[in-house]
Image (cartoon, rainbow, N blue to C red):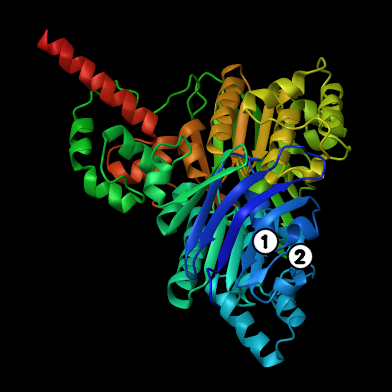
Amino acid sequence: MNGPAIELRSVTFRHHESSDPVLHDVDLTVDEGELCLVVGRTGVGKSTLLSLVNGLAPHFTGGRLDGRVRVEDRDTRDHLPRDLAEVVGHVGQDPAAGFVTDRVEEELAYGMEQLGLAPDVMRRRVEETLDLLGIAPLRDRPLRMLSGGEQQRVAIGAVLAAHPRVLLLDEPTSALDPVAAEDVLATIARLVHDLGVTVLAAEHRLERMVHHADRVAYLPGGGQLVAGEPGPILGPLALAPPVVRLGRLMEWSPLPLSVRDARRLAGPLRDRLRAVPPTAPAVRSTSTGSTGMGSTPVLRARRLVLRHGAVTALRSVDIDLLAGEVVALMGRNGAGKSSLLWSLQGGARLDGGSVDAGGLDPSKLGPKEARAIVGMVPQTPADLLYLTTVADELAQGDRDADRPPGACQAVLDRLGVDLPPDRHPRDLSEGQRLSLVLAIQLASAPPVVLLDEPTRGLDPSAKEQLATILRSLAGSGHAVVVATHDVEFVAEVADRVVVMAEGEIVADGPTAETVCSSPAFAPQVAKVLQPEPWLTVAQVAAALQSADAATNEGRR
């Protein structure tokens, strides 16, 4: 190879149905053995950029491409995606959509079979990949029986097993629990550093990836792209991870990109926070609290048992959901979180136990009646979209919820996501589809709202708006449950955290108490300021402001 691993020169790309280009006169160079992180708001063109590099755009998706895209000295104009398959591996936003076999081991081998590798080579690489990603126990499992995070690891493994020189990752950790995400990203970092693999990764959870990145490519909108070192690019941006925003608040220089970097600078800050009076808003409280004192549960579940064949997903689970409370449901991939949500919603056929939502069992009701009591946004939101345009989906959502026209659109507007009304839902990005389903489901505002990984594909601004909507729902008396691996979102929105493992609840308590005691689930600010119980940059800013005001008052 004589040039960069990835090179875009004067690239402009527009979809056939759009007059505005997604990318306009873009230049980007990624050298061999670099990890370049692609960042920007939902729907700004990150996935399109990746699809240009492996030739899916325009050869498969259509559209008009001007300029040149070269990968490993191959011009994508002259090479179809199949011609690039031996050097480029791609993991999309929806891993399950790319599966072509039925079982884990078969999926890991499939790509190598298409490249014509020898059986003994394939066998060795399958074993290496199973160990590398910690998925050996899943070897014989049907893909459809895996959790979303397990599917994501298998999809990454299927690409890694083929040993590509260029790796394209679209939201690679969106469904992974914090520990699994660290393991996968450490593996990718080893490939970059030790084997010279080039990685182009689009990701919203920057706190997980930015310290691994050599460069950042920022898409601000309007088709533009700005690339450079992570610190200077992310420093002024609202979408920067918490450690960067904390560094910006404290005027640290250079800005930290990792918890380790921030802790080295945070000693004086920890000292200042220790002097803040206990009344400072270090943690959020609720009117009901996690114990339910003075509040009757709007949903009560007792001794829930659920089996999927030989796998027991729920083992005699008890849980109460209280009005006015946002509950975060956490745990490693495959712990039983989605199974619990579907059981509460009435969509799972229980093997034991009962659910009582206001005197009714959702499983005994028709779909519309059950949704009026317990609303559910599943992990694969596209399953709920079946019409041909965004406008049709929103209008049908209004009718299904018996709401006036425009109710769903109003929620979508609050999320800050602009969707073309004539666009087909399948042509939206994963984050845009999720936003559409969130708007449809949240507009009906049932007494209990269940959300399974609701931040996948959402940029920080959309997540902030979602947090505002969920807190508003809770404030008006709804019970909200969010199953998520997004610890930063939990720190922003949750009053209570329930942790699951092996189909059982192993912890249940106030957010600050539960997450600060866990290295896996603690947000970045908590790790930087440990042992002080601070969760977010906003809380730190408010505490410092309170301390300064008290100091000034004392001087008077």
Q: Nearer the viewer, residue 396 or 252?
A: 252
Mark yes or no: residue 432 visible.
Answer: yes
Residue at x-position 65% and y-position 46%? 23
Classify residue 425 as left or right of residue 270. Answer: right
- Is the residue 534 above or below the residue 200 in the image? above
Q: Nearer the viewer, residue 437 or 476?
A: 437
- Provide the residue designation for mark 2: 99
- Residue 163 % position (x, y): 60, 77
Q: Secondary structure at mark 1?
A: helix
Q: Amino acid at mark 1?
A: Gln
Q: Nearer the viewer, residue 168 or 367?
A: 168
- Provide the residue designation for mark 1: 151
- Residue 447 % position (x, y): 69, 23
Q: Amino acid at mark 2?
A: Phe
- Residue 433 % position (x, y): 73, 40
- Is the residue 388 above or below the residue 465 in the image? below
Q: Residues within 10 Å of mark 2 (few under 14, many from 20)?
A: some
Do the CB atoms of the residues marked 2 and 1 lie less than 8 Å apart? yes
Badge 2 or badge 1: first in the primary sequence: 2
